[in-house]
């Protein structure tokens, strides 16, 4: 049996270096609650990501939930069904009604031209997703938000390190959130962060992720506990030193896939966007069954049987899950592009550790 090729593989720090940092933590006996590794990682990440302020979290879902709390979002929020469920779950946990708007197939992000029609008197915010790390049309989204007085919270879980014309995409909107889960480009095992524009907001978020404590005796809001501990902050510091090399390795995999697949009947994929620093977090291909000669699912299961694991991100759509499917905006007629993408997409194995041999094995499934 051939070795398994997984869709992703975690970027792991050198174990000896990590052990040395663990020894420091053991010596200090300071294992969580804004310790020195936590503070250092916030500082280094803000510099690396080119953002003014960042607050670390214990995963990528709680900053979404906390962002909605911080901005006191209520009523209805416009979002897209072509994402990981956590995007919409964060609305549900705040008692907010998700309103699904279709995606633009050229970015897989929310189609700004369809947002206005979904706005009602109850709409308070827009929650777009930089799907696959491809930047949304943040300018068009901000214009609508300004016109209607809406907040914008970006689920930027896929967009670590993504820049447009040298500026971080994480600076768009009111708040952006990141995930540092094991499967992402940059990981702290479990982890996440929120990016904000000013010190006051950073302070408020830091209170909210620590039960709302402003000091020993003052609780300013019903906060949550979502603090990152010192072990994972130390792990994150080591991974930050090698993330550029990992993104570079991913870029080479993307180039190899593109070179082999370009012009292949029935298979489409994305090229780099002009002026964008991509992170190559995913490599989605879209299968036109008639022209390719087999369906996406035939291809997916054929690969799986040979131990080559792609993933159908994002299938099913969030709007198809039982929690959401009865929402008025969850209909197929409202979301034609999202449905077509979900039915044709396959994310090919993409990570820093893929060898030329692995890439060749993935590509054998596309030989005619
Ligand atoms: C991974 C992911 C999340 C959630 O992050 P966790 O760290 O797993 O909680 C949220 N949104 C999107 C789009 C994601 O891909």
Image: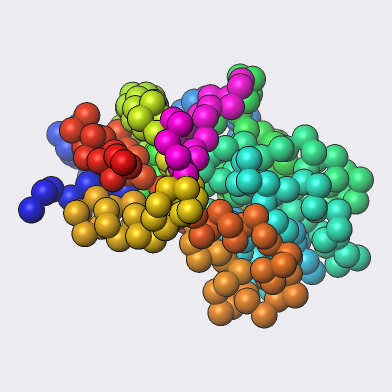
The residue sitting at the left extreme is 1
Q: Nearer the viewer, residue 294 or 205?
A: 294
Q: Is residue 16 left or right of residue 94?
A: left
The residue located at (72%, 67%) in the rendering is: 333
Q: Nearer the viewer, residue 26 or 121?
A: 121
From the top left corner, tell me how far across and down residue 3 is, in percent. 13, 48
The residue located at (78%, 66%) in the rendering is: 76
Residue 334 picture quarter: bottom right
From the top left corner, tell me how far across and down residue 285 is, in percent. 45, 44
From the top left corner, tell me how far across and down residue 117 is, in percent. 86, 58
Majority secondary structure of the magenta segment?
loop
Q: Is residue 366 left or right of residue 105?
A: left
From the top left corner, tell me how far across and down residue 136 is, in percent. 66, 40
Question: What range of the chain is rendered magenta?
Answer: 262-280
Tell me: residue 141, above or below residue 139.
below
Quadrant where the C terminus sits is top left
Q: Is residue 254 left or right of residue 226?
A: left
Tell me: residue 171, above or below residue 291.
above
The question of residue 279 being in magenta is answered with: yes
The residue located at (67%, 80%) in the rendering is: 326
Query: What's the image's color scheme?
Result: rainbow
Q: Is residue 85 left or right of residue 350?
A: right
- Does the rendering let one see residue 115? yes
Count of residue discs: 0
The residue located at (57%, 66%) in the rendering is: 318
The question of residue 237 being in magenta is answered with: no
- Does the rendering let one see residue 241? no
Tell me: residue 52, above or below residue 290.
above
Tell me: residue 277, above or below residue 153.
above
């Amino acid at each position: 049996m051939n070795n398994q090729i997984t869709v992703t593989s975690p970027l792991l720090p050198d174990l000896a270096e990590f052990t040395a940092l663990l020894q420091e933590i053991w010596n200090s006996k300071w294992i969580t609650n804004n310790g020195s590794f936590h503070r250092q990682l916030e500082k280094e990440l803000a510099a690396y990501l080119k953002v003014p302020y960042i607050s670390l979290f214990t995963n990528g879902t709680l900053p979404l939930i906390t962002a909605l709390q911080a901005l006191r979002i209520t009523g209805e929020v416009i979002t897209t069904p072509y994402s990981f469920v956590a995007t919409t779950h964060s609305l549900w946990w705040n008692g907010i009604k998700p309103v699904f708007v279709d995606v633009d197939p050229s970015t897989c992000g929310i189609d700004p031209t369809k947002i206005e029609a979904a706005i009602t008197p109850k709409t308070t915010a827009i929650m777009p997703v930089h799907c696959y790390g491809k930047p949304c049309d943040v300018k068009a989204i901000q214009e609508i938000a300004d016109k209607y007085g809406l907040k914008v919270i970006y689920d930027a879980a896929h967009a670590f390190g993504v820049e447009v014309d040298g500026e971080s995409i994480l600076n768009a909107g009111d708040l952006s959130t990141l995930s540092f889960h094991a499967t992402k480009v940059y990981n702290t095992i479990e982890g996440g962060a929120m990016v904000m524009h000013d010190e006051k907001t950073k302070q408020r978020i830091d209170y909210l992720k620590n039960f709302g404590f402003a000091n020993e005796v003052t609780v300013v809001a019903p906060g949550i506990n979502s603090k990152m501990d010192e072990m994972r902050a130390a792990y994150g510091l080591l991974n930050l030193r090698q993330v550029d090399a990992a993104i570079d390795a991913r870029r080479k995999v993307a180039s190899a896939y593109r070179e082999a697949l370009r012009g292949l009947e029935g298979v489409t994929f994305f090229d780099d966007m002009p002026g964008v620093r991509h992170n190559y977090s995913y490599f989605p291909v879209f299968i036109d069954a008639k022209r390719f000669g087999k369906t996406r699912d035939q291809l997916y299961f054929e690969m799986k049987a040979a131990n080559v694991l792609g993933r159908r991100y994002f299938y099913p759509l969030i709007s198809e899950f039982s929690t959401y499917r009865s929402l008025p905006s969850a209909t197929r007629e409202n979301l034609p592009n999202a449905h077509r993408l979900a039915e044709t997409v396959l994310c090919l194995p993409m990570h820093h550790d893929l060898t030329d041999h692995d890439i060749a094995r993935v590509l054998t499934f596309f030989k005619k």
